[in-house]
Each structure stands twice: as structure tokens, then as C-alpha cells.
């Protein structure tokens, strides 16, 4: 008689193409269920800039984005992340459903790849499945998954995890084709977002723990060479290697101190990932109660692991725990300076999307120690059920701010379009259009939003944008600005709309 764990392992984790498809398909369905609430939500903030830019670009223009401009204010090299936007703009137009499906499906695939990786690293089938489930339903993820403009996070992590799975396969079996594919996937991750620069560190750790032969460890050198080549490419094309430049050319990545390094690589990511509570949504009572409940569940997981001798050298739990903690620290390294911008309302938590995979691995290893015979089983199952219920409810709660922000975006665009005449070109909106409880509204993108709502066929001169780096508002049908107070010179505006009244 096969146990339920054995059946799960055979059906989903057997190293066959069919089993991999079943597993990935299941996680896509889980992700769609977890994010079903927001699938029809409207565009927000930078979504509009990307939508206008990519719908105006030809295929040749799209290929040109693989060579960045030195005048790029953010110093980004993320050409592959533009490809889904370019395709979706032609398939879906101004219907946000297709864009949300792209983000959520990628997120589901990432959860599936994490489960595959955990199983490759000798985690039990139940533990590997749980790791993917924790990641798929994490309340931390709306900033990276619900916000369409953050597509580069799920797309980067997809290639990152794919590269890790292929690397582990090579380290254990020595198939050269797996190594080559892993290197290509790493390069693709870099072309989606810079946070993939942490992969050579992770690859080195995987080689130390899981290489079947010492000669396989030498392959890690290739990942470091690709990373070095990428940095040289940034230097030659952008004139520097740091990102997020201000008007004076200073980068937030240049801020450094030992205390900041230690805090942002240990306490900050672990605290935020483990307790993804939006203080702007939860009241003080619910916030404290949820905090205590999650702390109790984590305490139970640690006691469970200790009770069942999860640290014993004869099983793999010890190395999985080390790898989970190391994953959080190492993948936070490229963005450790940016973690100081993560706020209590969970804004900017997309920086922790990749480290969140390490937390899922860590928690699953604690509750599924290999080599142990867990008794009583009901206690472990109770912890899992309570945790996943709390996790799923928090995900829905954290998505409410994005859902409301999207509704505000939709209503404001139509209010401006349908309540102003064609002659009223310059519009000023009085109100706070920046964020709503951690969700972006119109921090950027109000002009593209209004003009595309007015005319879905509206486009810009892509080559002019490429040369100057700014949208030319002179050609727009309506020019919109906003502020929390009325403008000082009302006569300069054709219409003033106060959304506070």
C-alpha cells in the first residue's frame, strides 16, 4: 500500500514531463484562485506609461529596447519584461484581464518551480508541495503580482527558479545540456530585472551542498562570468552600474553602512515576509491579534522540528533550513538598500518577492522534517490548516487596497473624459492621487490614462521618446495634473475637478 505522500510524489513529482505539467498546472489554478478577486481590476500608475509606450512601439522598436539609453533616468536594463506588455497590448488593448492573467499565471508557475526545486533538494513530497503553496498564497505578493507594472518581478523569478532547477539537475547528474539551459535561463532572468545578480551566490551555495562530484562545482564559474559580463554591459551602455538615479545622478544603491547592511539582510526581510500585515487596512486590534497568531504558528513549527529531531545529520532537513535562511539573505543582497523603502502598508514589498521563496522553503522544511516519523499527525495538520487559512485571508485583505485603487482609477478616468468638453484641454484634479493604503493610483501615468481612455487608438512618437526620454504632452488631447491643494493660478487651467467634494 502506498502512503498518501508516496501517491503525491508519484503523481506530481515523478521526473517526467507529464508530472511536471500536472504540478505546474495545479499551481497556476491555485494562483488564479488566490488572485481571482483582482483579475478584472483596472490599470494603475506606471501601468499606463508602459501601456502607451509599448502599444506605440513596432517590433523593431521593441528589439531596440535591448540596447538601453545612457539617458535612462532609472538605469534599467529590463528588455525581456517589455515583451509580454507588447504582446498583450495587441491582444487585449485596454482590457486589463489579459495583463492580470499574465502576471498571475507567471506567479503560479513560479510556485510550481519552487516546489520542484524543493523536491530536488530532498525535501519530502508533502513539504515541497507545501512550500509552493505558501509562496503561491503569500499575502506579501500583491505588490509584485497584482500591480501589472511589476511584471518584471514574476518574470525574473520564473527564469531564476528555472535556472536553479536545471542547475541542481546538473549538479546531481552531470548533464551538460541542463547546465547550458540553466545558464541561458540565468541570462534571461538578468534581462528581466537586476535582482537576478544574486544567482551566482545561490548557485555557489547549491554546488557546495548538492554537487555529486567536485568537478561539477567548477561550473559555478560560468554564472559569475555572465554576471560580470552583464555589469560590464551596464557600464558601457548606461555609463554606470547603479540604478534608481535622481536628477543629480546619485543612486539609492550608493547608500551604505554596516548597520544598514546587517539589518536589511536579516531582520527586515524576515520580519516583513513572515508578518505581511498591512497596517493601513488592519485596525490596531486585528493587527496585534494576527501578529500574535502568526507568531504562535511559527513557534509551533520550530518546536515541531525540534521535537522530531529535524536537525539530525542523517537527514536533509538541516541543509534545507540553512539553504532557506541563506536564500532570504542572498537574494536580498541586490536590493538591500531599497528595503528601507518598504513601508508598514506593504508598499515596495515586491523587492522581497524572490526572498519570499526562501521563506516558503524554510517554513516547509520546519514542518516537514525528512527522516522523521511525525506523531501525532493531527497536530502538524492543524498547524498547516490554520496557517494556510490565515495566509489566504490575509492575501485577500491585502488585495483590497489594490482593488479599491483600481476602482478609483477607473472612475476618475471616466469622470475627466465624460465631464469635460473637447475644448477643455488643461485639467487640474484636486485630491490625493498618489497611493491608497499601499496601492499605487496615479503616482505616475495620469496623462496616458486619460488620453487612452479618451481615445484607445492614441499613440506617441516612439522614436521621439527614445531620443528624449519623456512623453511629449503637446500632442496630447488633454493635459492633466493633480495636487492635494487647488492650483495657485486657476486661470491657467480650463477645468478644475475636486474629487474631495
Image (cartoon, rainbow, N blue to C red):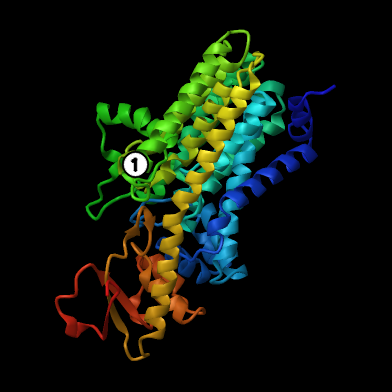
In this rendering, does residue 277 appear at all? yes
Q: Is residue 436 above or below residue 223?
A: below
In this rendering, does residue 44 appear at all? no
Q: Residue furthest left?
A: 488
- Residue 406 occupies quadrant: bottom left
Give the residue at mark 1. 285
Q: Is residue 134 above or below residue 409?
A: above
Element marked by disc 1: helix
Q: What quarter of the picture does the N terminus occupy? A: top right
Residue 302's x, y, as percent? 49, 19
Q: In this view, does 108 lie to the left or right of 177?
A: left
Front residue of 487/467: it is: 487
Q: Is residue 363 above or below residue 496?
A: above
At 64% from the left and 39% from the top, the residue drawn is 112
Q: Is residue 283 left or right of residue 454?
A: left
Q: What quarter of the picture does the C terminus occupy? A: bottom left
Q: Residue furthest right?
A: 1
Residue 407's x, y, as percent? 44, 67
Residue 248's x, y, as percent? 22, 52
Total numbered badges shown on the rendered structure: 1
At 53% from the left and 27% from the top, the residue drawn is 363
Front residue of 143/383: it is: 383
Circle 1 Cα neighbour tier, 10 Å, few/some/many (<14 / 14–19 / ≥20): few
Residue 158's x, y, as percent? 58, 43
Amino acid at each position: 500500500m502506498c502512503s498518501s505522500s508516496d501517491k503525491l510524489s508519484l503523481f506530481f513529482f515523478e521526473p517526467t514531463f507529464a508530472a511536471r505539467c500536472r504540478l505546474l498546472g495545479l499551481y497556476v489554478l491555485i494562483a488564479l484562485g488566490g488572485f481571482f478577486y483582482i483579475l478584472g481590476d483596472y490599470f494603475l500608475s506606471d501601468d499606463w506609461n508602459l501601456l502607451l509606450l509599448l502599444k506605440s512601439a513596432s517590433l523593431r522598436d521593441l528589439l531596440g529596447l535591448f540596447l538601453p539609453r545612457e539617458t535612462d533616468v532609472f538605469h534599467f536594463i529590463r528588455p525581456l519584461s517589455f515583451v509580454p506588455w507588447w504582446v498583450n497590448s495587441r491582444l487585449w488593448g485596454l482590457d486589463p484581464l489579459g495583463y492580470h492573467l499574465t502576471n498571475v499565471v507567471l506567479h503560479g508557475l513560479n510556485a510550481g518551480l519552487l516546489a520542484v526545486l524543493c523536491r530536488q533538494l530532498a525535501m519530502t513530497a508533502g513539504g515541497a508541495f507545501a512550500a509552493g503553496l505558501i509562496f503561491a498564497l503569500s499575502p506579501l505578493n500583491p505588490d509584485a503580482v497584482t500591480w501589472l507594472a511589476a511584471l518584471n518581478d514574476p518574470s525574473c523569478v520564473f527564469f531564476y527558479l528555472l535556472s536553479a532547477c536545471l542547475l541542481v539537475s546538473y549538479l546531481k547528474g552531470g548533464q551538460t545540456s541542463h547546465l547550458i539551459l540553466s545558464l541561458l535561463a540565468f541570462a534571461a532572468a538578468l534581462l528581466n530585472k537586476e535582482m537576478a545578480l544574486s544567482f551566482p551566490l545561490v548557485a555557489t551555495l547549491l554546488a557546495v551542498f548538492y554537487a555529486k562530484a567536485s568537478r561539477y562545482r567548477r561550473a559555478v564559474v560560468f554564472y559569475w562570468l555572465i554576471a560580470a559580463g552583464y555589469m560590464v554591459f551596464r557600464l558601457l551602455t548606461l555609463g554606470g552600474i547603479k540604478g534608481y538615479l535622481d536628477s543629480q545622478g546619485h543612486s539609492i544603491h550608493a547608500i551604505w553602512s554596516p548597520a544598514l547592511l546587517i539589518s536589511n539582510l536579516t531582520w527586515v526581510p524576515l520580519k516583513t515576509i513572515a508578518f505581511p500585515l498591512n497596517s493601513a487596512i488592519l485596525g490596531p486590534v486585528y493587527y496585534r491579534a494576527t501578529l500574535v497568531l502568526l507568531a504562535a504558528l511559527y513557534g509551533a513549527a520550530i518546536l515541531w522540528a525540534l521535537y522530531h529531531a529535524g536537525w539530525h545529520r542523517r537527514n536533509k532537513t538541516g541543509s534545507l533550513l540553512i539553504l532557506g535562511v541563506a536564500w532570504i539573505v542572498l537574494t536580498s543582497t541586490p536590493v538591500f538598500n531599497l528595503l528601507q523603502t518598504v513601508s508598514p502598508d506593504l508598499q515596495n514589498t515586491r523587492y522581497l518577492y524572490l526572498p519570499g521563496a526562501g521563506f516558503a522553503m524554510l517554513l516547509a522544511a520546519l514542518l516537514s522534517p525528512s527522516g522523521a516519523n511525525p506523531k501525532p499527525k493531527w497536530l502538524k495538520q492543524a498547524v498547516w490548516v490554520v496557517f494556510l487559512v490565515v495566509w489566504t485571508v490575509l492575501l485577500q485583505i491585502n488585495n483590497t487596497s489594490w482593488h479599491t485603487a483600481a476602482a478609483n482609477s477607473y472612475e476618475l478616468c471616466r469622470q475627466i473624459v465624460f465631464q469635460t468638453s473637447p475644448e477643455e484641454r488643461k485639467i487640474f484634479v484636486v485630491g490625493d492621487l498618489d497611493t491608497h493604503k499601499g496601492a499605487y493610483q496615479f503616482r505616475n501615468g495620469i496623462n496616458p490614462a486619460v488620453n487612452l481612455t479618451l481615445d484607445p487608438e492614441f499613440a506617441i512618437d516612439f522614436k521621439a521618446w527614445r531620443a528624449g526620454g519623456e512623453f511629449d504632452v503637446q500632442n496630447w488631447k488633454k493635459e492633466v495634473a493633480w495636487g492635494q491643494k487647488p492650483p495657485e493660478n486657476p486661470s491657467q487651467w480650463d477645468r478644475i475637478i475636486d474629487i474631495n467634494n
